[in-house]
Amino acid sequence: MDHFVYKDSELYAEGVPLSRIAREVGTPVYVYGSAAFEGHLLAFDAAFSRVPHLVCYSVKVASNLALLAKVAKLSLGADIVSGGELFRALTAGIPASKIVYSGVGKTAAEMAEALDAGILAFNVESAPELDLLSQIAKDRGRQAPVAFRVNPDVDPGTHPYVATGLKESKFGVPVEEAFALYLRAKDDPNVNPMGMDCHIGSQLTSVTPFADALSRLKALLARLREAGLAISHLDLGGGLGIRYDQETPPSPAEYAQTIVEGLAGEPVTLILEPGRVVAGNAGVLVVSVLYDKLTPERRFLVTDGAMNDLIRPSLYGSHHSIVPVAQTSAEPVKVNVVGPVCESGDFLAKDRLLPPVPAGGLLAVKSAGAYGFTMSSNYNARPRAAEVLVEGDAYRVVRARETRQDLIRGETP
């Protein structure tokens, strides 16, 4: 769903013109649409209504407390990868019993914190992690709920930086190692091997890799049953892609059909970890044009939005649609949309056809709700952008723009 549409030649977020937000809050600013965010969550949840399941929103994608509070309001769960994300999820009201903890580098302190909170499951990714978790659980007089993250060696056909299910990846354990770890865990009184986890990558635009991974997981489930282990839940991660440019990813319903049909007869509760498909097209980054710079080789639109605000184009070579906030019929020209950061890699788009936008004009970088603000930084001593949530005809600032005092908090001359 796209809730960022033109009305009378002006781009709106639901019932609020983006120009108003830019004028009153400043730029750069992330703007999220509540209707889109909640609608995407509900659509994903409804797609699996035929089977026992739990949707655990991927906190790393967009972690503002206002967004996480909407996850809690819908009685959904969270997928976390750090103690900080656990803190965010709990603060927003998401029950610990609906939180799964992924990630290859959990510390002892993070494990203890999550155990004390009573999370649903640790997605364990190595033998040393299992050993540490067992010891932490023993020390605290608890039994840790465990799902091993299985690496099925499936090519997701996505960017190599976000492909997580290949054998050369740092994530998860190979199938044979996973089987051995389950047998170890079965005899360990400090852990309860009650689940299985698999996440093969992000921005997938075909159901085929999901189906391939699922077939390998089912074979492992059968072996575990024969060995006397009862696996109660199967966590299939997230990764469903969105349309940034010309992609044609499957809908949540099409994805769910593949998974549900592939699991027919398996007595497990499904756990899903959608992130990008929920938040990606529910957010835009609004930036102001500073200069229209013409050189003998290129034309640059220099904006106040930079790679520290949205790193995806520089890091992944990602395409984000960019449109003027004020619609115009002027003939498009080819430009590079760049920021003021002191790096040649600081760009939001290259060789993009855009109508002329004068200094002071506004651009909206679309599909920026996922991995936008959460990956932002203070590089070049730039305060991070404000975040705004639009709800119908009103909006509220859900994260204030950082100040220069924020830049030096905790530092000592």
Image (tube, helix red, strand yellow):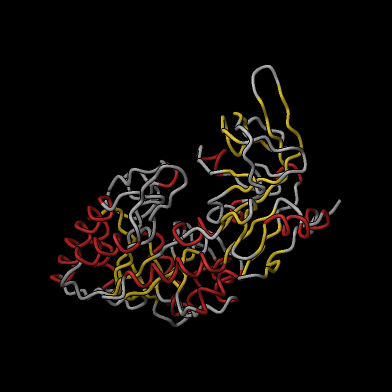
Query: Horizontally, is 389 left or right of 37 in the view?
Result: right
Q: Is residue 90 above or below residue 351?
A: below
From the top left corner, tell me how far across and down residue 87 is, in percent. 58, 71
Image coordinates for residue 281, horizontal then vertical, percent: 51, 56
Q: Residue at x 76, y 54 (%)?
A: 26
In the image, residue 306 above or below residue 149: above
Location of residue 351 (image quadrant): top right
Q: Position of residue 341 (x, y in %)?
A: 71, 37
Q: Which of 124 and 341 is in front in this view?
A: 341
Q: 93 and 261: which one is in front? A: 261
Q: Which of 108 and 172 is in front in this view?
A: 172
Residue that lies at the very extreme toward the bottom in this rendered image: 141
Q: Is residue 193 visible?
A: no
Taking 279 as reference, is 373 left or right? right
**Residue located at (60% from left, 47% from top):** 365
User: Which residue occupies the extreme top position in the image?
Assistant: 296
**Res 330 quadrant in image:** top right
